[in-house]
Image: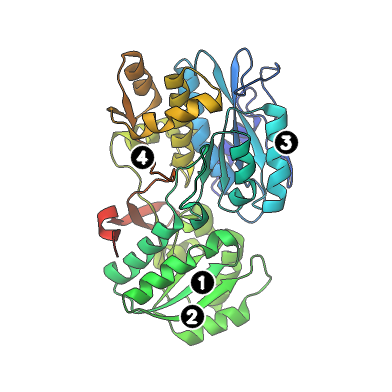
């Protein structure tokens, strides 16, 4: 994690009146910065609470800060342009620790103390443990993560703003087979559920296209050594390794892989590997030489340009981090749905989410422009920094992907695009 990112995160977690703290492992801290009590819709006389529930500690602790970065950008933009229904947005956080058991009390606490009008997160690691509770409590929730368990969900209040791993796995396999031409592959994934949902899509797509899967490993996170697993991997002699490991586990695993002579095998990772933190964990020179990360394609149009500008203003000129654009889009969609519904009550504005996200209507690329269009009596179709953000009947989004490499400083460098049409039926 580079210095600017640490400073930005510290600034965010200490900013009074915008963020109400990040709890320790297994807990959450939630408060209403206005000091007033909250009622229906999570609003007091002058604020509307928005919860961000994600891992801020644990093996995938980068997910919380990265998502929160984007939410912060959206909240600053929204509050600077009149807020929502004349009220300012206030962020509260819940640390799920990336654990289904810890997530339940953490989210229950933030719901009971802050009464948020919406929740951004939780991630794939914990969403299934709380999804029924959130839907029953009628809390609009924008899940982050690709778990295939949400592919056909039937929940009125739950949406997902990231593509499914069922699409991600196909995109990873497409890049390895169609673009690079590998015919002999190993799959190395964490044993946690969020990583394992990639296994089926990757393996079935590879086998469908004649690729010999010589090894399929489940790696238990945070072990002191993976020597036996690495030896099996090297003995299998793959041309490429498809992987998703958390940074700490990856640091140990790939360090041993390099020590034992397997450091010249190309790596194809998912969006978890598409971060400076991951590249630093396995070594920047190694990442630059061998790692290609496949993730949802950034919107290269007006929405992306505006987001990059807003992000640089909030985060001291740094580049957007992974998942931040998803948090940004989720926050904007929620705010615009509230404005369109003229209510911050989730049971009311939930009916307007697709109206602002899917259209039909005037394409809008940021909050200020969208609000102006709504006030002018126009229907809108929000185009996000992470993509079109059009929800299907299961409240999921689809989209294109991109393959990214790394430069010597750990910054992402696009290698190629993987279009949605190229993946259809692949």
Question: Which of pointers 4 and 1 indicates the residue nearer the eye?
Answer: 4
Q: Where is residue 127 in the image (x, y as percent from the top left)?
A: 59, 48
**N-terminal-most mark, 3 or 1:** 3
Q: In the depicted view, which residue is nearer to us: 206 or 309? A: 206
- Residue tagged by mark 1? 188
Q: Is mark 2 on a helix, strand or loop?
A: strand
Residue at the image position 40 percent from the left and 44 percent from the top: 393
- Residue tagged by mark 2? 215
**N-terminal-most mark, 4 or 2:** 2
Residue at the image position 54 percent from the left and 34 percent from the top: 140
Q: How far apart are marks 2 and 1 (CA)?
A: 8 Å
Question: Which of pointers 3 and 1 indicates the residue nearer the eye?
Answer: 3
Q: In the depicted view, which residue is nearer to us: 367 or 129? A: 129
Q: Where is residue 213 in the image (x, y as percent from the top left)?
A: 42, 79
Q: Distance between the residues labelled 3 and 1?
A: 36 Å
In this picture, residue 222 sits left or right of residue 140: right
Q: In the depicted view, which residue is nearer to us: 60 or 290? A: 60
Q: How far apart are marks 4 and 1 (CA)?
A: 32 Å
Relative to 285, is 258 above or below? below
Q: How far apart are marks 3 and 4 (CA)?
A: 31 Å
For the C terminus, the quadrant is bottom left
- Residue tagged by mark 4? 390
Q: Distance between the residues labelled 4 and 2?
A: 37 Å
Q: Distance between the residues labelled 2 and 3?
A: 43 Å
- Residue tagged by mark 3? 109
Contact between labelled residues 1 and 4, with CB atoms less than 8 Å apart? no
Classify residue 378 by image quadrant: top left
Question: Which of pointers 2 and 3 indicates the residue nearer the eye?
Answer: 3
* Extreme residue toward the bottom, this view: 235
């Amino acid at each position: 994690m580079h210095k600017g990112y640490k400073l930005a995160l510290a600034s965010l977690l200490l900013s009074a009146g915008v963020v109400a703290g990040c709890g320790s492992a297994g807990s959450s801290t939630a408060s209403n910065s206005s000091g007033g009590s909250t009622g229906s819709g999570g609003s007091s006389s002058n604020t509307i609470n928005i919860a961000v529930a994600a891992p801020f500690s644990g093996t995938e602790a980068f997910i919380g800060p990265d998502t929160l970065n984007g939410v912060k950008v959206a909240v600053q933009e929204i509050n600077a342009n009149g807020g929502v229904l004349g009220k300012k947005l206030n962020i509260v956080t819940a640390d799920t620790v990336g654990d289904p058991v810890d997530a339940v009390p953490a989210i229950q606490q933030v719901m009971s103390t802050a009464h948020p009008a919406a929740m951004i997160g939780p991630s794939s690691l914990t969403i299934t443990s709380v999804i029924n509770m959130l839907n029953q409590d009628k809390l609009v929730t924008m899940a982050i993560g690709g778990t295939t368990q949400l592919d056909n969900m039937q929940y009125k209040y739950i949406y997902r703003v990231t593509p499914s791993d069922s699409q991600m796995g196909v995109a990873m396999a497409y890049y390895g087979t169609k673009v690079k031409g590998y015919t002999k592959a190993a799959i190395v994934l964490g044993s946690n559920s969020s990583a394992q949902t990639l296994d089926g899509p990757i393996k079935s797509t590879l086998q469908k296209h004649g690729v010999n899967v010589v090894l399929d490993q489940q790696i238990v996170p945070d072990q002191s050594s993976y020597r036996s697993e690495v030896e099996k991997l090297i003995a299998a002699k793959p041309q490429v390794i498809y992987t998703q490991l958390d940074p700490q586990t990856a640091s140990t695993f790939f360090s041993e892989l390099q020590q034992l002579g397997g450091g010249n095998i190309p790596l194809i990772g998912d969006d978890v590997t598409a971060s400076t933190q991951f590249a630093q964990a396995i070594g920047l020179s190694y990442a630059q030489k061998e790692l290609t990360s496949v993730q949802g394609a950034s919107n290269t149009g007006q929405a992306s340009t505006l987001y990059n500008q807003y992000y640089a203003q909030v985060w001291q000129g740094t580049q957007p981090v992974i998942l931040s654009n998803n948090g940004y889009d989720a926050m904007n969609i929620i705010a615009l749905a509230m404005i369109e519904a003229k209510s911050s009550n989730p049971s009311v504005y939930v009916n307007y989410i697709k109206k602002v996200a899917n259209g039909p209507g005037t394409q809008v690329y940021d909050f200020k422009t969208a609000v102006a269009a709504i006030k002018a009596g126009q229907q809108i179709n929000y185009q996000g920094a992470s993509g079109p953000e059009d929800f299907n009947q299961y409240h999921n989004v689809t989209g294109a992907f991109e393959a990214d490499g790394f430069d010597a400083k750990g910054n992402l460098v696009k290698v190629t695009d993987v279009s949605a049409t190229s993946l259809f039926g692949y």
